[in-house]
Image (spheres, rainbow, N blue to C red):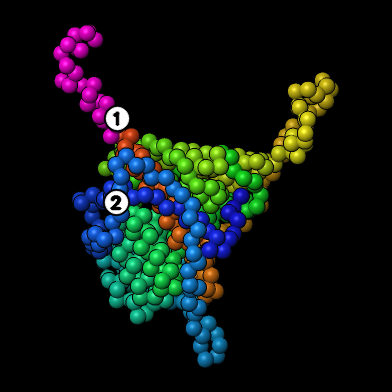
Amino acid sequence: MHQHRRSQAEQPHRRVDPLPQRGVSSDLPQQGWPRPGPRNASRQRPTRAGRERIAELHPVPAGRPARTRPRTEAGRVKPLRIAVIGGGHLGRIHARLLADTPGVQLVAVADPVLRSREEAAAAARTEPVADYRELFDRIDAAVIATPTATHRDVALDCIERGIHVLVEKPIASTTLEGEELVATARRRGVVLQVGHVERFNPAWKPLAGEIGRPRFIESLRCGPYTFRSTDVSVVLDLMVHDVDLVLSLVSSPVERIDAIGHAVIGPHEDLANARLQFADGTVANLSASRVSYEAERWMRVFSTAGFASIDFNKRTSTLVNVSPRLSEPGFDAAALPPEAKNLFKERLFADVLPMRRLPTVDGNAIAEELLDFAASIREGRDPRVTGEQGLAALAVCETINDQIARQNAREAAVRTLAHPAIIPPAERRAAG
């Protein structure tokens, strides 16, 4: 069920037409991180009123191979010097894991907040630094776990100096920013990996090649309110994981997106549902909430070959394969003789729809992600989740967010027109 591995030249790139920016609230604290500056007006592409953004597949030319690590005089590969930029929840996890990763030297944790950087650095036994720019001459790569609104500026600073980057999801705040990062990384010949960590979940990995072409996909990703990633909607906070997984399964353009969402606590949506319809007929129904009583993360995939169920929390996956007998010409279960029909019912789940639990190897998904990042740098290959793939997921999520905004605006307009103060007196009398 995992995506078929292809060269970067063959990987699909989904692009969307930009719509007016959904900016970050001015009152959201960025805790000292550089805020995105004004864009170059020449980079802004025009929009057309009422035009829906529909993701389309475009071939992406392969970038230059990443630079391999230098060797010592004895021929041994030097440790890969990596810094973690951002000392929050995810940054601390990355730092702690990198500190124990073979072949890696964790140089520092950078964060403008004193307490954040000192606590993260102490836990990872490394140096705290206030300004990540002080590290440019001391590192080969960086893991960026800063607020989403800063991803573009921080990542671009690193990439322009030839530093390989693993940036947490989403790749950037907007597709325009994401396109800039992808193009710059290709020009500079550095690795740009995006932190869609579910690709490394032990429940996901064994499904590679086990299921045919998807026809219907549904997913649920929800959990309690954590006060993390509240600078973006639940679509970019949680649903983006499932969008990335779906795009890795379906090799067809998105033709239509319908979505609805609601903000419960803050200015951004805390729960959302999106329906993606692809050109080949595949449909994906995705739901996400960060105001749920319990944490759930699962996906179900119905395909031409069977049915797969993945529980990302429990790290288990089951597969139901459809017997080839059902595809035989002329086979009709309803037309079977009574005895054969009874036997068919008795043996339905043993012979016709057998279920098996796929073996999984327990492991830490983030640790595996970091190992893939380091290996892609050393071997000069693409990481499992490229910048282009992260951009494709962002493009779909941006469209989902815009559809939610449009739906909310339509509902607000209907409520306003239905208000008694708006309805003409004659119509009110006729209605009453």
Judged by its main secondary structure, the magenta piece is helix
Residue type for callout 1: Glu
Callout 2 secondary element = loop
Residue type for callout 2: Pro
Identify the residue at image location x=50%, y=47%: 253
Identify the residue at image location x=65%, y=41%: 304
Callout 1 secondary element = helix
The answer to which quarter of the image holds residue 217 is top right
Which portion, as a residue range, is magenta?
409-432
Among numbered discs 2 and 1, the one appearing first in the sequence: 2
Q: Name the residue under label 2.
A: 46
Look at the image and say whether residue 385 sits in the magenta stretch: no
Disc number for residue 411:
1
**Camera sees residue 90:** no
Label 2 and label 1: CA atoms lie apart by: 27 Å
> Callout 2 environment at 10 Å: few (<14), some (14 to 19), or many (20+)?
few
* Residue 255 sits above or below residue 97 on the image: above
Disc number for residue 380:
none
Look at the image and say whether residue 412 sits in the magenta stretch: yes
